[in-house]
Amino acid sequence: MSNLTYNKMWHQTQEALNSLLDKESQKKTEPQRNKVIVFQMLATFYIKYVQIFRNMENVYDQIVHPQKRMLIRKILSGVMGRILELKNEMVELEMTEFHYFDDILQDLKLAPQQLDVPIPRFFLKERLEAIKGREKILAQILNEYGLNLSGMNYAVKSIALEEAVKLIQIAERARQGRLRALFMKQIFLQECRAKEMKLLSQKPSDTGIAALQIQKVWRSFHQNKKTVKEREEEMVFLGMKPPPRSNEVSTAIIQSEHLRRLRNEVQLKHEKRYKEALVNIKEDLKVMEGPDIKDHLQDQIRRWFIECRNLTGAFPVYPNEEEGGSAIVFSDKTPEQVIEDILAKQEEEEKLKKKKKKEEKESKPKEGKKEKEKKGNLKEKLVKEEDEEWKMSPSLFLQLMEEENCLYRDMWMNKDESWNFPQDYDPELIKEKKRKELEMEIRVQVDELMRQELKNLKLVVNRQIELPSQEKKGKKQTKGKKGRRGKRGKDKDLTANRTIESLYKELVEEGLLIQALKVNLSDYIGEYSYLGTTLRQVAIEPMPSLLDVKQLITLYGILPLGSAEVHEKAPLVKSLLLAGPSGVGKKMLVHAICTETGANLFNLSASNIAGKYPGKNGMQMMLHLVFKVARQLQPSVVWIQDTEKTFYKKVPHAEKRNEPKRLKKHLPKFLKLLKPDDRILIVGTTQRPFDAELQSFCRVYQKIILVPRPDYGSRYVLWKQIILRNGGVLTNALNISCLSKVTDGFTQGQIVKVVKEVLTDHRVRRQPNKPLTAVEFIAMMTSMNPVYKEEEESFKNWYAKTPLGKKRILSLTVGGGKEKEEKGKKKGKIAKKK
């Protein structure tokens, strides 16, 4: 795609955003009481913002113009923040983390796959050099101390010389036997052909009959081949069978990737030239226009002095640097407008004085107690009525998006860019920006000169001497402020004399800072839940699908960590808990967050910190080290594996020596220290949340995500993808639907393990002669234990005891009670009619 197509896509997306912002402003003024209507409104906004986000992210990744990219980036952060705000609104309205939009998707004519929130590519692209440098340092430290598991040399088992000779002999004899068999087969076939030739030579030959026979055989063979091909094409078209060579990368994809790389190179070149132009154009303006700007400002301020003297009879008070200097007086105003403002202020002051005198003369009687009580009761009633009506919480991103949208309209919407075919920077826009900066710099210098000139004028004309009383007061106030700051800043730095590099190295040596596995979130395979809304209509709370979990990880983990602007203003999520049975991919999701955002990974699991930094002082030092390094090298993820051990109800006797509950008291304090500026996320994973104290558990973890076992749809997609990724070929002999049904209850980890065990190099090579069957995989799974429904129910029951789970149950019971009352009334009316 060319630059013109991406520009067109940007303009279309901007129009969609503009219309959506107008709709939001309209809906804000309309109060709503029906929760269903409110949810539909929020859901439509959410889905539309996701579509805008997808298009805008694609445009930002591929557009080349540096000044356009700056504006698009700001809009992107605003859209991301608004998506998170709407998600928070929906969670508070429905009291659940999982939502289903089947009806709305049908109305908007969208597929469920379009609900996936994309991960912006600039998260890694803009920090690529820093991430690579950090990975090199980490690899060096791990290699020095022999902690790099990936580079370990596995020991080779040695055997005796006689056994080795025997193995070689067996292999050689087998090879010779295979060659002899092939040779004998060829001799046998030659003898058969000779016999056939003798028989044919004895019979009378009829060329017509022979030709017909050959035609019949060839036509039947050709037609059979054609029908098989057509049947396969039909199955591929219906989606019942994967396309041939689905593992192979097409030439179109290779070409598009090549174009992406070229575009990225052009982006870097244009950004480099733009940064150089910012400096060069400013210097040129300083030389060319600097003296004129200085003279213009001096003339403007002198004129102000004279006009004020003529009108008021005294020279004006010159504003200080802290107040903004002369910029406050002449902020987009001419000297005539400034004089009019001065006269208007004098008139207002006189009017206020007259009003005060009248009020003193005519003192009104005070209101009685009864009247006050009546007013208070009315206020309470109004407050109650307002509480009943639903109102959207104020947004921190709507204003930002509206401002950027106005900039787009004024600057880029109707701009003629026929001269700028390569989409390089626009020098005129830089000049406009730099003129303002240059004017501010020159104004500071002019203010110093004009203050002195004003003093001289006062001395010459009025013989006035300025008293330094105001300046002294200002100094006293600043002293007081400094003293307060000094009192607040008493937080001790336990490692003030040490560098971040040394602290980083120490944490790696102790095994608290570990290397994250390179796993993308797209590797977490799952399917959309198509029965969510229907189950909720029948008052059954469905288990979330794997795609729902994946989406929550993107919203709560990846987007805030990847963007500093979003993390500061969006609803702050400091901690996440991933609860689910073993093998459902909790650990993989933690590593995926780090991979997608380029975050550091700190491991504070109970088993990992056992015996390290003993005592209270040691614990404080460990948390201080982790917090300091995580803050300096943000984004960072603090992972607590098997986090239920930190909050044990009763510590098992075997684990008492390890002191698993060491972090229990310190974690809430650690969370309080985290500010919106700190892109640090605490992630806990557990497969036995029932063993932990629920209250303290829920205080630490702000968001609790239940990770379920895969349903039928997810298993079907998973089997397909994992078999193809491991070199398998899908044929009619392999019934994946049957395989998915039989493996109900088995987790993703178990499925991946079975596929890897079955598809060895030898088995992959034998596929053309012996295609894969479902029996091979099922036979391997007989030794594994699935996740039974009882275990899944225990997780659901535990989640129902969490704060959000309790709220959800209460909302359902209240809603169910109202529905029963309405049904009862209807039945009563029907009985009376009868």
Image (cartoon, rainbow, N blue to C red):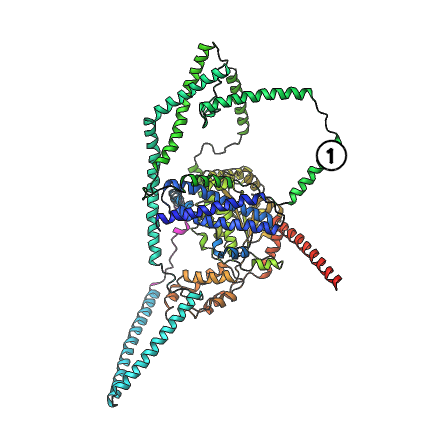
| Extent of the magenta region | 142-161
Residue 36 highlighted magenta (yes or no): no
Question: In x, y percent, where is residue 107?
Answer: 52, 56
Using the rendered image of the protein, determine whether residue 587 is visible from the camera's viewpoint.
yes
Q: Is residue 493 above or below residue 356?
A: below
Q: Is residue 324 above or below residue 727?
A: above
User: Regarding mark 1 in the picture, which secondary structure is present there?
Assistant: helix
Q: Is residue 528 left or right of residue 411?
A: right
Instruction: Determine the residue positioned at 57% across, 22% down.
Output: 348
Along the line of sight, the residue nearer the viewer: 310 or 826: 310
Amino acid bearing label 1: Glu
Mark 1: few/some/many CA within 10 Å (<14, 14-19, 20+): few
Question: In x, y percent, where is residue 435?
Answer: 38, 30
Q: Is residue 105 left or right of residue 121?
A: right
Q: Is residue 494 above or below residue 249?
A: above
Tag count: 1
Along the line of sight, the residue nearer the viewer: 717 or 619: 717
Q: Is residue 275 left or right of residue 458?
A: left
Q: Quadrant of the C terminus?
A: bottom right
Question: In x, y percent, where is residue 128?
Answer: 38, 44
Q: Is residue 26 left or right of residue 734?
A: right
Along the line of sight, the residue nearer the viewer: 501 or 224: 224
Residue 145 highlighted magenta (yes or no): yes
Most common secondary structure along the magenta stretch = loop
Residue 373: image quadrant is top right
Using the rendered image of the protein, determine whether residue 195 is visible from the camera's viewpoint.
no
Dot 1 corresponds to which residue?
373
Residue 433: image quadrant is top left
Q: Residue furthest left?
A: 201
Question: In x, y percent, where is residue 437?
Answer: 40, 29
Q: Is residue 379 above or below residue 547?
A: above
